[in-house]
Image: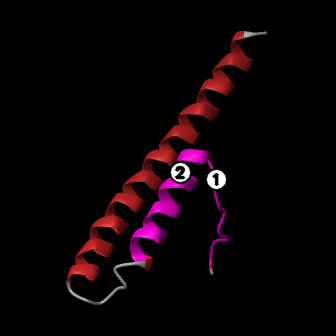
Amino acid sequence: MGVGVLRNRLRALEKKLGEAQRMAAFVDQFEAEARAGVEAGRYCPVDMPVIVDCFRRWLRDGITFKVPRGR
């Protein structure tokens, strides 16, 4: 395996890690807003923690979604 191939693999891995970090930050922010919403009575205290847990499991399991731009 050549140096160029290894470099390309490293770049792809770095890009993937960056995307995962952005998604984790999004879920952290969503969870904070969801907790505030539950405390304020805007969201269901039963359903919202389940939704946040689903997001966390998707991140943990590496499930990603690609959203087309412009929609």
Q: Secondary structure at mark 2?
A: helix
Q: Is residue 50 above or below residue 3?
A: below
For badge 1, the amino acid type reads Ile
What secondary structure is the magenta-colored segment mainly? helix
- Quick check: marks 2 and 1 in contact, CB under 8 Å? yes
Hey, what amino acid is under mark 2? Leu
Residue sitting at x 27%, y 67%: 32
Query: Dot 1 corresponds to which residue?
Result: 63
Residue at 27% x, 81% y is 37
> Quarter-wise, where is residue 65 in the image?
bottom right
Query: What stretch of residues is rendered in magenta?
Result: 48-70
Locate residue 60, reporting x and y percent: 53, 46
| Neighbours of disc 1 within 10 Å: few (<14), some (14-19), many (20+) | few
64 or 57, nearer to the observer: 57
Local SS, label 1: loop
Where is residue 35 shown, x and y percent of the image? 27, 72
Residue count near mark 2 (Cα–Cα under 10 Å), binned few <14, some 14–19, many ≥20: some
Picture coordinates of residue 22, whole percent (x, y): 44, 52
Image quarter (top left, top right, bottom left or bottom right) of the C terminus = bottom right
Where 37 falls versus 32 (above or below)?
below
Q: Please name the residue that numbered disc 2 is placed on.
A: 59
Task: Name the quadrant of the N terminus.
Answer: top right
Residue situated in front as seen by the camera: 10 or 27: 27
In-image side of 19 versus 9 (left or right)? left
Q: Can you name the residue that lies furthest to the bottom here?
A: 42
How is the model colour-coded? secondary structure
Residue closer to the observer: 5 or 38: 38
- Residue shown at 34% from the left, 66% from the top: 31
Give residue 70's position: percent from left, percent from top. Answer: 62, 78
- Mark 2–mark 1 Cα distance, whole angstroms, equals 6 Å
